[in-house]
Image: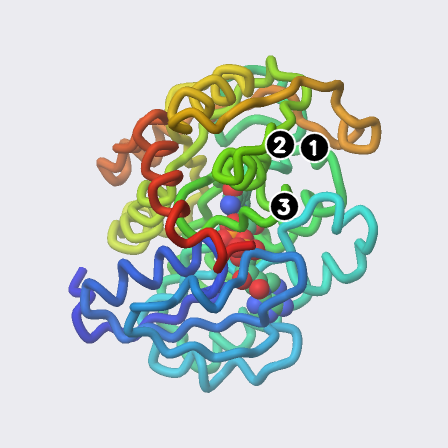
């Protein structure tokens, strides 16, 4: 696919994954519009798009006229979402409004203004719920553990209907925990790793809840590569894929690695899972992403050690912009 001059819309483009994707697309010469509502508590940060040749439109997908933004787009990367699990539990109506209702708004606008655009939708492994078997493939039953899982599943399914009924090339990527530059590190709203990175860089101890749970963290450059590969490979269109990352490691192992790579400032304490979190926790997870690897040749390139080291190095001089 020729990205040079290609018109691309990235929803959620000022957020963690969206901004990293915008940087890469702009570097490839694409004409990128990033739409972002800078939602409270999300990963949007004005610093995220610094240095990228990207047009930023501040607007809310629940309200803004989406047709002019879709007009002429060859690819829509759809990452805007309410991503907080606790947030979804506390205010499920707001959660549905973004993750499901506004998805239908975007679908309708794109039908009018960009009928041929390829859509790559950011989905999540969250709605598999507690894994019945590991690794989890795409045929694993769906059992959302929380309201956010329900709304994200609904949003994905509206997009897949758009493929089946309208024939639009849609790819949905069910992501696992992602990390790396431009992550929200102010607090724990965007994975535990955000707050761990902050604490390590500030020389404060971070908390490990439980510790035995397995995760297959994906470094953000590998996520960006997966989004681009999904758009580029027609064999992906109309399909749903799991995206995994580094080989599974326990939270305890990841914490040890953080401490070792911290250069001396890292410490952690282990505590019981807080009761309100434990009720929506999914336990151990790692993905079987062999279908996506087979369809595209993609595979994660950045191991955990390298990814954590790169993340700490990236944030160290930029800490103030992310607190
Ligand atoms: N980061 C992960 O580990 C992970 C894991 C699984 C799935 N995902 C999915 O990937 C996508 C991107 O996640 P992220 O980690 O970059 O989160 P993020 O919060 O950094 O990015 C989402 C962006 O969407 C924007 N947004 C939210 N509601 C909006 C609205 N109504 N109108 C306009 N913009 C709005 C936010 O302001 C934010 O910048 C999401 O769809 C998320 O569900 C992420």
Residue indicated by mark 3: 187
Q: Give the label on residue 162, or none.
A: none
Residue 58, percent from left and from top: 53, 78
Question: Pointer 3: residues within 10 angstroms few (<14), some, or many (20+)?
Answer: some
Residue indicated by mark 2: 128
Question: Pointer 2: residues within 10 angstroms few (<14), some, or many (20+)?
Answer: many
User: First in sequence: mark 1 or mark 2?
Assistant: 2
| SS for dot 3 | loop
Quarter containing the N terminus: bottom left
Seen at 47% across and 65% down, the residue is 14
Quarter containing the C terminus: bottom right
Report the front residue among 237 and 128. 128
Is label 3 in contact with label 2 (beta carbons under 8 Å)? no
User: First in sequence: mark 1 or mark 3?
Assistant: 1
| SS for dot 1 | loop
Residue 160 shows up from this direction: no
Ligand 1 image-quadrant field: bottom right
Seen at 48% across and 39% down, the residue is 201
Residue 180, percent from left and from top: 41, 43
Q: Is residue 293 above or below residue 315?
A: above
Examine the image and state in which quarter residue 95 appears.
bottom right
Q: Give the label on residue 143, or none.
A: 1
Seen at 54% across and 69% down, the residue is 107
């Amino acid at each position: 696919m020729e990205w040079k001059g290609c018109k691309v819309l990235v929803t959620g483009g000022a957020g963690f994954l969206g901004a990293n994707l915008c940087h890469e697309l702009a570097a490839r010469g694409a004409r990128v519009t990033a739409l972002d509502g800078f939602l409270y508590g999300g990963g949007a940060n004005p610093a995220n798009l610094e240095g990228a040749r990207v047009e930023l439109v501040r607007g809310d997908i629940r309200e803004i006229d989406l047709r002019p933004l879709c007009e002429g787009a060859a690819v829509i990367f759809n990452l805007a979402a309410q991503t907080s699990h606790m947030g979804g539990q506390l205010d499920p109506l707001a959660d549905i409004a973004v993750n499901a209702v506004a998805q239908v708004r975007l679908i309708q606008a794109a039908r009018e203004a960009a009928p041929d655009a390829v859509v790559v939708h950011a989905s999540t492994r969250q709605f598999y719920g507690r894994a019945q078997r590991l690794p989890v493939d795409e045929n694993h039953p769906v059992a959302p553990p929380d309201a956010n899982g329900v709304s994200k599943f609904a949003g994905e399914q509206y997009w897949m209907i758009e493929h089946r009924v309208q024939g639009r090339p849609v790819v949905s990527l069910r992501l696992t925990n992602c990390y790396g530059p431009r992550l929200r590190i102010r607090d724990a709203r965007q994975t535990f790793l955000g707050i761990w990175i902050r604490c390590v860089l500030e020389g404060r101890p971070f908390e490990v809840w439980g510790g035995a749970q397995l995760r297959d963290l994906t470094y953000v450059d590998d996520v960006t590569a997966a989004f681009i590969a999904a758009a580029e490979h027609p064999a992906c269109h109309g399909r749903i894929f799991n995206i995994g990352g580094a080989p599974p490691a326990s939270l305890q192992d990841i914490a040890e690695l953080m401490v070792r790579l911290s250069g001396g400032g890292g410490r952690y304490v282990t505590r019981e899972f807080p009761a309100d979190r434990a009720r929506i926790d999914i336990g151990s997870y790692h993905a079987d992403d062999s279908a996506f690897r087979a369809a595209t040749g993609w595979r994660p390139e950045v191991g955990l050690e390298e990814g954590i080291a790169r993340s700490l190095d990236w944030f160290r001089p930029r800490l103030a912009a992310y607190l």
